[in-house]
Image (cartoon, helix red, strand yellow):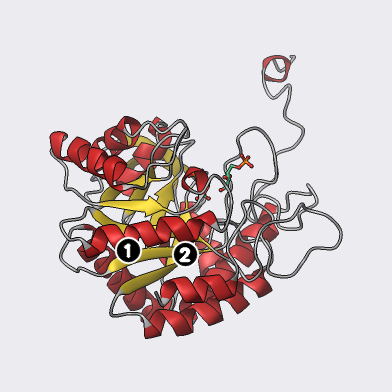
Amino acid sequence: MTNDIHLTEDLRVKELKKLVTPAKLKEELPLGIELTNKVLADRETVRDIIHLRDDRMLVVIGPCSIHDPSAALDYAQRLAKVADQVKDRYFIVMRVYFEKPRTTIGWKGFINDPHLDDSCDMEFGLHAARKLLLDIAMLGLPIATEFLDPIVPQYTADLVSWSAIGARTTESQTHREMSSGLSMPVGFKNATDGNIEIAINAIESASNAHSFLGIDQDGHTAIVKTTGNPNTHLVLRGGKQPNYQFPEVTYAACKLEAAGLEKTLMVDCSHANASKVARNQVKVWESILEQRAKGNCPITGAMVESFIEEGNQKISGNLTYGQSITDPCIDWATTEKMLRM
Ligand SMILES: O=C[C@H](O)[C@H](O)COP(=O)(O)O
Ligand SMILES: C=C(OP(=O)(O)O)C(=O)O
């Protein structure tokens, strides 16, 4: 008897390779009770800030993407020191982004391709990513990430205190469903063209209960039923034009109010708000501080792309240590100066 299955499916699939299960990875690299309590406390602080119960600013800062765990840890050590010194004003959460959504094609991040050579050794990527998350958490830094692939949170979400849904996926039902079940606060970015309605719709969608397909800790496909996530907010990242200045921020706050939502949002200093020029982030940061200083301001959070060296570089044989291989970042000296402004 012929097996018809092979005539009609998997015609373009070269290989399916089994991966470590989330449960097994966590057994190898456990969170432990101390870090569990730390993550719970950090999430509580983020919730207090976005719901206006703590008037410090949430600052999500760090490299555009992780590609070299040693450089990321070096950066984290520097950031942990400053974070402690400015903790009266800012609650600093490090960007530890392992997944990159691409406009067309390109390197998709450390979990997908940790050796940067298209070998896509995701087994290694997941292990090394979780190890780095633990190392950074042990320095006392809360962690932020973007969740792109809906399977990845099962491997890493227990270590994350704030997450983003990116401009390219905020309108996706899959990402809204996933967010409805995430345990940490989630920021939804406006679309790449600047549309903020899709993020407001995402906030409403994610606050509701959903049922969808996913995997459990043993890697089995499962029906996931969620309760809805009440801890979500808008992130203004610019679109066709920047949207960080007072008129656009006020417009966004009015839209939130009209939708019956809290007037609380994060401004992304990078991406289209900086026209992808690293140093422009300083101007956006200054505008955020000015707007907050005037009072009655909906900006409760800021995002900054920062690393050790300024700018970015193409993936090649000889990489400059501490420099981004995705979007350009400000360097460490500028970062420190900004955080001490
Ligand atoms: O933050 C990173 C990038 O802006 C995003 O991943 C899109 O990158 P690309 O336009 O270079 O593909
Ligand atoms: C991809 C990112 O942002 P955006 O979704 O705004 O392009 C990012 O923050 O890394």
Residue at point 36% right, 52% down? 267
Q: Write the residue at 16% across / 34% down.
A: 259
Question: Is 87 or 93 nearer to us in this picture?
Answer: 87
Residue nearest the viewer, comparing 22 with 228:
228
Is the residue 237 above or below the residue 306 in the image?
A: above
> Could you tell me the amino acid type at mark 2?
Ile
Q: Nearer the viewer, mark 2 or mark 1?
A: 1
Q: Which quarter of the rendering shows the C terminus?
A: bottom left
Q: Position of residue 304 (x, y in %)?
A: 47, 60
Q: Is residue 284 above or below residue 320?
A: above
Which mark, by number, is residue 289?
A: 1
User: Residue 143's x, y, as percent?
Assistant: 44, 67
Disc 1 is placed on an element classified as helix
Q: CA distance from mark 2 to mark 1?
A: 16 Å
> Relative to residue 313, is residue 175 depicted above or below?
above
Identify the mark at residue 61; answer none if there is no mark. Answer: 2
- Mark seen at residue 225: none
Amino acid at dot 1: Leu
> In the figure, residue 15 lies in which quadrant?
top right
